[in-house]
Amino acid sequence: MNEEQKNIQANLLIVEDDSFISGLLQRRFAQEDYGIFNATNSEAALEVLKKNKINLILLDIILPGVDGITFLENLKKDPAFKDIPVIITSNLGQPEEIEKGIQAGAIDYIVKANATPDEIVEKVKSILKK
């Protein structure tokens, strides 16, 4: 196999309104040959989902307009998108916030302040291998 040949492992949707964090995650996942789609709010995220095959979503909670939890609850009700795994990435780290995210349908919850981009990449890899 040609080592220079790049195969996209999976398509990720990063829903994050902080351009610094979004850019950091995009660069790190691109190094691992992931296809990256980006949205800064729930409405834009839904448009990306309608037009592309997405394998996993990294979702912030605090977003302009519809918040991440409401977006996730709506996503899980939609037959077209309900099976896409979602990892919440948020700086809200209180146990009740984490529980709310998991109950809404997230497969995992990462507190951004407590995780490096490498740790987030490893978490995504482990979920996509299942």
Image (tube, helix red, strand yellow):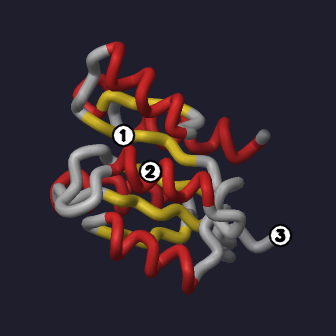
The location of residue 94, given as percent across then percent down, is 27, 17
Q: Which residue is mark 1?
A: 89
Q: Nearer the viewer, residue 3 or 105?
A: 105
Q: Is residue 43 left or right of residue 4?
A: left
- Name the residue located 49 percent from the left edge and 42 percent from the top edge: 87
> What amino acid is at disc 1?
Thr
Q: Which residue is mark 3?
A: 1
The span from disc 3 to disc 2 (Cα, nearest Å) is 31 Å
> What amino acid is at disc 3?
Met
Q: Nearer the viewer, residue 111 or 24?
A: 111
| Earlier-in-chain disc, 1 versus 3 | 3
Q: Which residue is mark 2?
A: 58
Are the residues at dot 2 and dot 1 in contact (C-beta closer than 8 Å)?
yes
Q: Is residue 73 above or below residue 114?
A: below
Mark number displayed over residue 24: none
- Name the residue located 32 percent from the left edge and 47 percent from the top edge: 60
- Disc 3 crowd rating (10 Å Cα; few below 14, some 14-19, many 20+) is few
| Earlier-in-chain disc, 2 versus 1 | 2
Q: Which residue occupies the extreme bottom position in the image?
A: 51
The location of residue 16, given as percent across then percent down, is 28, 57
- Name the residue located 17 percent from the left edge and 56 percent from the top edge: 18
Question: In which quadrant of the rendered view does residue 77 lie?
Answer: bottom right
**SS at mark 1?**
strand
